[in-house]
Structure formats: structure tokens, C-alpha cells
Image: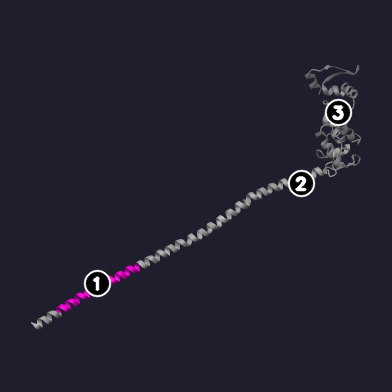
């Protein structure tokens, strides 16, 4: 009995030992599983942290780019768009150039008030030139600008004393070779120019100016004027007859 009890006890201890071994093995397996789980979790956390770092890194880079872009846009807003600034600068340059040209043209122009002795500006932007000492260019400028002014008898008298002749090329040879407005001789093109030139009477039909009413009347009774106007002219009596019919006037021309 004692032997059986001892054997049973031994067997029981052995069985307990076996059970303990299984438990220990189970615990070891559980521990390894827990370690693997912890390792996996750690690996997972590391991967998540790495992903977070990878996500944050571009965000930081994008943020810096965004900040740089915002700063550059702010500077553009302060300084203005370079293209618009260049365009505005070009416009300003054109305006300045145009103004300089106008100022230069004004300073090269002759002062008409000085001709009359009425200019009160010591620093006048127009040239103060003696009318008797005008250059050809200055004379051409005066003749070009006079028709654009309101007629002034006193100024016209000053101009008439200069004895500027009529342009032979324009009036007798079919055309002036000089550019328009550059000729220093009279081009009597209409009554306004003729009046400044001293011809108070003007024949539109023949484009001629006259200094008196008698000259104008004599011209109107001339054969040349009657031929141009389509009016019959009697050579024996030297006066006009009734106008020709339009058909005859056209045939005569």
C-alpha cells in the first residue's frame, strides 16, 4: 500500500508535472503570442509613425511653398504685377515723350504776341524773334499756323510788311515740291489764307485773291472768269450776258 501510495503520489506528481509543463508550454505560447502581438503593434505603431512622418514631411514642404507663394503674391500686390507695371511704365513713357515733343514744338514755335509787342512773359515758351529776321523754317511755321488763328488785322499788317511772295510752283507750275506746311511762300488755297496774305476779296471760281473791290469787279467781268464760271462774254461790249445753259457750259469746258 505504501508502495502504491508512493507510486500514485509519484504518478500524481508526474501528472501534475506534465500538466504544469503543458501549462507552461501554453503560457510560453501565450507569451510568444503576446510578444508577437506587441511586436506587431510596435511595428504597426512604428509604421504608422513613419507614415505620419512621411505625410507630415510633404505637408511641411507644401506649407513652406505655400508660405513662399503667399509672400510673393503679397509682394506683387504691394509692388504691382510686373506686366501691368511694365505696361503702365510704357504708357507713362509715351505720355512723357508726347509731352516732351509738344514742349519742344512749342519752344520751336514763334510767339505771335511778340510780333505785336504784347507778350509779357520773360520766360515765354515760344520764341521771341524779330519778324524781319525770320528763317525760312520759322516763316513756314508762321504761314502754317496763321490760318488756324482768329483773324487779327494788326497781326496781318505785321505779316504783310514781310512781303512774303506767293509760291510759283504751287500757283503756276501745278504743285509745290516741298512737304505740306514746309513751304515759306504763300499757298493761297482759300479765302482765310488769302485774307492773312493781304487779299480781302476772294474768287472761289478762279481761286484768286484781290486787294480791293474794284479789282474783284474787274476780274468778275473778265473773259477768263466768265469762261470758268460758264458765263457768256461779249467781246465788243466787255460785259457779261446771261449764264449759258448747263449743257452749253459743260460743252464749253
How far from the left and from the top, in percent, is residue 79? 63, 52
Q: For the magenta stretch, what is the residue range?
A: 11-40
From the image, tell me which residue sits under label 3.
Answer: 208
Q: Decide: is 95 above or below 228.
A: below
In front of the other: label 3 or label 2? Answer: 2
Q: Do the residues labelled 1 and 2 touch (CB within 8 Å)?
A: no
Helix, strand or loop at disc 2? helix
Label 2 sits on residue = 100
Which comes sooner in the sequence, label 3 or label 2?
Answer: 2
Mark found first going from the N terminus, 1 or 3: 1
Q: Is residue 183 visible?
A: no
Q: Is residue 66 visible?
A: yes
Crowdedness near tag 1: few (<14), some (14–19) or many (≥20) residues, C-alpha within 10 Å? few
**Residue sitting farthest toward the bottom:** 3
Query: Cα distance, mark 3 to mark 2?
Result: 40 Å
Percent x, y of residue 49: 41, 64
Q: Residue at x 60, y 54 (%)?
A: 75
Q: In which quarter of the image is the C terminus?
A: top right
Q: Distance between the residues labelled 1 and 2?
A: 103 Å
Q: Quadrant of residue 70?
A: bottom right
How is the model colour-coded? Answer: one colour
Location of mark 1 (residue): 26
Between residue 7 and residue 200, name the one nearer to us. 7
Q: Which residue is drawn at 80% across and 42% down?
A: 106
Amino acid at each position: 500500500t505504501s508502495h502504491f501510495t508512493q507510486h500514485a503520489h509519484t504518478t500524481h506528481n508526474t501528472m501534475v508535472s506534465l500538466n504544469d509543463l503543458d501549462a507552461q508550454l501554453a503560457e510560453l505560447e501565450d507569451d510568444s503570442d503576446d510578444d508577437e502581438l506587441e511586436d506587431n503593434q510596435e511595428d504597426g505603431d512604428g509604421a504608422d509613425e513613419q507614415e505620419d512622418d512621411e505625410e507630415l514631411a510633404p505637408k511641411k514642404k507644401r506649407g513652406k511653398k505655400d508660405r513662399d507663394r503667399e509672400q510673393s503674391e503679397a509682394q506683387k500686390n504691394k509692388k504691382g504685377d510686373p506686366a501691368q507695371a511694365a505696361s503702365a511704365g510704357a504708357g507713362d513713357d509715351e505720355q512723357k515723350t508726347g509731352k516732351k515733343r509738344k514742349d519742344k514744338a512749342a519752344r520751336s514755335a514763334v510767339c505771335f504776341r511778340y510780333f505785336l509787342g504784347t507778350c509779357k512773359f520773360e520766360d515765354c515758351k515760344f520764341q521771341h524773334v524779330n519778324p524781319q529776321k525770320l528763317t525760312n523754317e520759322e516763316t513756314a511755321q508762321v504761314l502754317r499756323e496763321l490760318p488756324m488763328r482768329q483773324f487779327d488785322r494788326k497781326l496781318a499788317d505785321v505779316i504783310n510788311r514781310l512781303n512774303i511772295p506767293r509760291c510759283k510752283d504751287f500757283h503756276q507750275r501745278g504743285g509745290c515740291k516741298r512737304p505740306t506746311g514746309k513751304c515759306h511762300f504763300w499757298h493761297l488755297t482759300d479765302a482765310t489764307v488769302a485774307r492773312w496774305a493781304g487779299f480781302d476779296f476772294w474768287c472761289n471760281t478762279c481761286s484768286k485773291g484781290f486787294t480791293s473791290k474794284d479789282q474783284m469787279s474787274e476780274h468778275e467781268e473778265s473773259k477768263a472768269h466768265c469762261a470758268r464760271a460758264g458765263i457768256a462774254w461779249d467781246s465788243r461790249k466787255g460785259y457779261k450776258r446771261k449764264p449759258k445753259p448747263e449743257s452749253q457750259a459743260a460743252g464749253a469746258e
